[in-house]
Amino acid sequence: MPTNTRKSRVVRSTGAVLSAGLIVASFATLSGAAVKPKATVYPAYPSGKITTNDIKLAAAYTGGTANKQAKGTPVKVGWLNDDGDTVAYPDNTTGANLAVSFVNKYLGGIKGHPLQLVSCSVNNAGDGASCAQQMVSAGVKVVVTGTIIDGNAAMYNTLAAAHIPIIQGSDLTTTDFNPPGKGVAVTYEPGSPGVVLGLAKFIGTSKSGVGLGFAPKSIAVVYTNDAGGTSAYNLLFKPDTYLKGLTIHGVAVSPTADAAQVQSAVVASGAGQDSVFVPLTPVSQCIAVYDALKTLNIKAPVVTSGLCFGTQMIQHLNGTLPKNWYFGDYGVNYFMYDSKLLASEQLGVYMAAIHQADPSTDPTGLAAPAFGTILTLNKLYNEAGISATSAKMGTLIEGFKGPQFGNSGPLKCGFQPLLPAICGQEMGVALFNGTNWVAVEDAYNNKLISGFSGFGL
């Protein structure tokens, strides 16, 4: 667990270490994929500004009024996120603020009233209780989180004592998935457990012509030694229903490990031709992993963070993405646009909002899930009304059947007794073959993966 005294700021430009959108994985070989699904050519997302259809689509989801600007007394909602820790997650706040602006300008806010975020950064353990108390003092009826790794237990306890429900964002730790305090706290994403278990299922059920195209004998893992990476490896990525008979060897690295340290970890993990290699790391280490595998001439299939298709990776590879890598997602991703798939259309609304606000902004990472969470909150608040109590909001939040805006798959909160905060059940995998994107197991071909199915925690 990170220390309580860290103050230096290393801001990630894309995504987190191990969240629902984050452990989102990719399967790859450097010299060619083991399985060759038939390619469907998906166009890139429209790169223009917000359109009338974008606004109508979002309004249909939220129950708002298209092209109506919110006015009057604001409806205040709490927003808590780690914006400035050693490894920070400011893209959550970028996405949340973008969504608030979109809702207020184009969707009539909440029943015509502006949505306003009461924000507090939980950067260290001591910030959790104080930020939560700030929410209580502000009188908010609901709190939304981005990603928090320090002080979250105190935050949950304080908000639960005040009976303020929480819609969680891209969570990392076991505390997030089984929060203390017996309050309402749920995430509409599968969380890192759902994604990691989905990856395990994808690997463990691979065979000739399915998944990776072969049945691997071992898995080599390099993971960060922070709360997210450690909990994912120790709790979830181990021999289980899907990985029985496979040898798994993990090596921990610092979240700020440099290229040389990552290469040493790759060697120590024992990655080889008959293994699957799994780095659970930020994008900077993912780039270092790519370089290390190339330098060491290791041809093992690779499972890496979905953040590996972010701007840093594209720049590192001179404008492209790693050929024949399989990327995990929530059913749709940032590069495969399908106008007949609702979740893809909704993600396109976010892409348009990003382009209109600042075309230079990296659309990948955690901004999109945060955008979707705020629009989902907007939907629930429109249903409840501006005078809704915390109790009313809590009932709607727990009972929401989904999906979250921009996500695919059903929701069922509390379906995992040991991880009761998780509502999302499914994730997907897609391939970039060097020219086109290929739907492997995701919403594009109706083959979403449920890692929780058949697995007992």
Image (cartoon, rainbow, N blue to C red):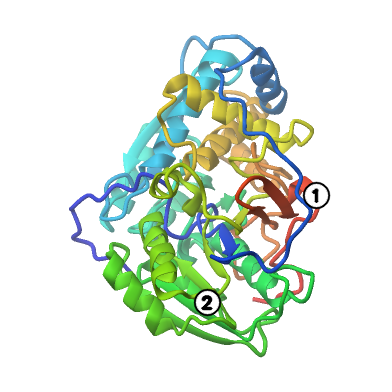
Q: Which of marks 2 and 1 is in front?
A: 1
Helix or strand or loop: what does disc 2 sit on?
helix
Q: Name the residue under label 2.
A: 235
Q: Mark 1 points at which residue?
A: 445
Dot 1: few (<14), some (14–19), or many (≥20) neighbours within 10 Å? Answer: few
Q: In which quarter of the image is the N terminus?
A: bottom left
- Whether residue 136 can be seen here: no
Helix or strand or loop: what does disc 1 sit on?
helix
Along the viewing direction, whichever of 364 and 82 lies nearer the viewer? 364
In the picture provided, is 265 more to the left or to the right than 61? Answer: left
The reply to whether discs 2 and 1 touch (Cβ–Cβ < 8 Å) is no
In the picture provided, is 26 more to the left or to the right than 343? Answer: left
**Mark earlier in primary sequence (2, 1):** 2
Along the viewing direction, whichever of 190 and 324 lies nearer the viewer? 324
Q: Is residue 151 above or below residue 162?
A: below
Residue 283 pos. (x, y %)? 41, 55
